[in-house]
Amino acid sequence: MLELNHVSVEFMSDNNVLAVDDVSLRLLDGSRTAIIGETGSGKSVLLLAILRLLPPNAVVSGSIAADGEDLLAADSKRMQQIRGGIISYIPQGGGASLNPLLKVGFQVGEPLIEHRKYTKRQAFEASIPLLRRFNLSHEEELAYSYPHTFSGGMRQRAMVAMGIAAGPKIVLADEPTKGLDEKRVRMVADALDLIEDETLLCVTHDINFAKSVGRDICVMYAAQQVEFGDSKEVIGHPLHPYTRNMMAAMPENGMRYQESGFAPSHDSYTDEAGGCRYLNRCREHMERCAVTPPLFDINGHKVRCWKYASSN
């Protein structure tokens, strides 16, 4: 189980930036959760905070635990064991993170060398059934090939195979469909569907992809978690004005975009900043919105909006 309680990430500089602000998630074993939101909402920073891969000027507060183990208190040696062995990370970029100079089979099997003490030969041989699990076809031939011979969708599926190679309990996927066309997006969704036992936390800006891979959806806006719930509920019956406008703006929904005004720059998000982050763009705002709303729980469907205060 992965638990995040009131996690915030602030980058300290001349103008401090609060990149993640008060995010809480409780992901049970085998759960599948997608985080959606526009660029700069803090999605990817949250994943890197879990893995403790942020730069030195990042200050992480709150608590992050995997199966009860405090990840923020773990030393560097223990974190090396956790990364890949317990929590794996699939980076964004259509598989561009693969080393162009190494055969795909070696790269897919490499986590087994680091975390399960396989020899290079054993790891390479183990990469073939891993690739086969994701329906790449001619897997033995592909294991001896280099990344440039793969399509974007094939490279991303190889990255998913690498991510689960060492048998982690938790898989973090960061924009796994970025830069891919519709056909290859479907390939990646199919690959993630084959992850059955692991807990999946997937960051994406693609709403339809989020719906296909996540049983639950967390919506982030301007560093904050503004909505969370069952994916069918969040997509079909969104509560937060931002989520509703985001859904209405989709082409299949007629692009009925109803925001007003402009969002403030991210430089203005600090610990001292108050009020609803969506205030300047929301047509439903009221006087109370000048105070930061908490996350209200409406029968398991959570929303950060004062409109639902009376329901709690």
Image (cartoon, grey):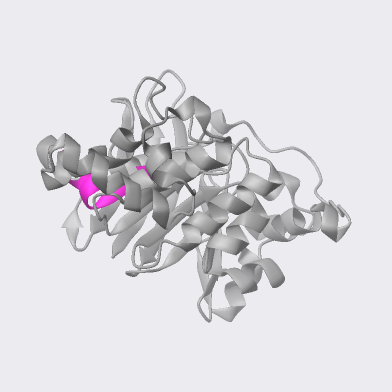
Taking the spot 58% from the left edge, 43% from the top edge, the residue there is: 177
Q: Quadrant of residue 27?
A: bottom left
- Number of marks in the image? 0
Query: In the rendered view, does 143 fall on the left or right side of 258?
Result: left
The N terminus, quarter of image: bottom left
Residue drawn at (81%, 45%) of the image: 260
Q: Position of residue 126 (x, y in %)?
A: 25, 48
**249 or 265, which lies in front?**
249
Inspect the magenta stretch and tell me whether residue 56 lies in it: no
| Rendered image quadrant of residue 263 | top right
Q: Is residue 312 visible?
A: yes
Asked whether the viewer can see residue 40, the reply is no
Dominant secondary structure (helix, strand or loop) of the stretch shown in magenta: helix
Percent of width and height locating residue 312:
53, 79
Drawn side of residue 126 relative to residue 287, left or right? left
175 to the left or right of 288 = left
- For the point 52% across and 54% down, the residue is 35
Residue under the point 34% across and 51% down: 130
Which region is colored magenta? Answer: 80-89
Q: Nearer the viewer, residue 244 or 255?
A: 255
Relative image position of residue 107 (x, y in whole percent): 32, 34
Q: Is residue 84 magenta?
A: yes
Residue 294 position within the rendered picture, expressed as x and y whole percent measured from the top left: 50, 62
Of the pair 309 and 65, the residue shown nearer to us: 65
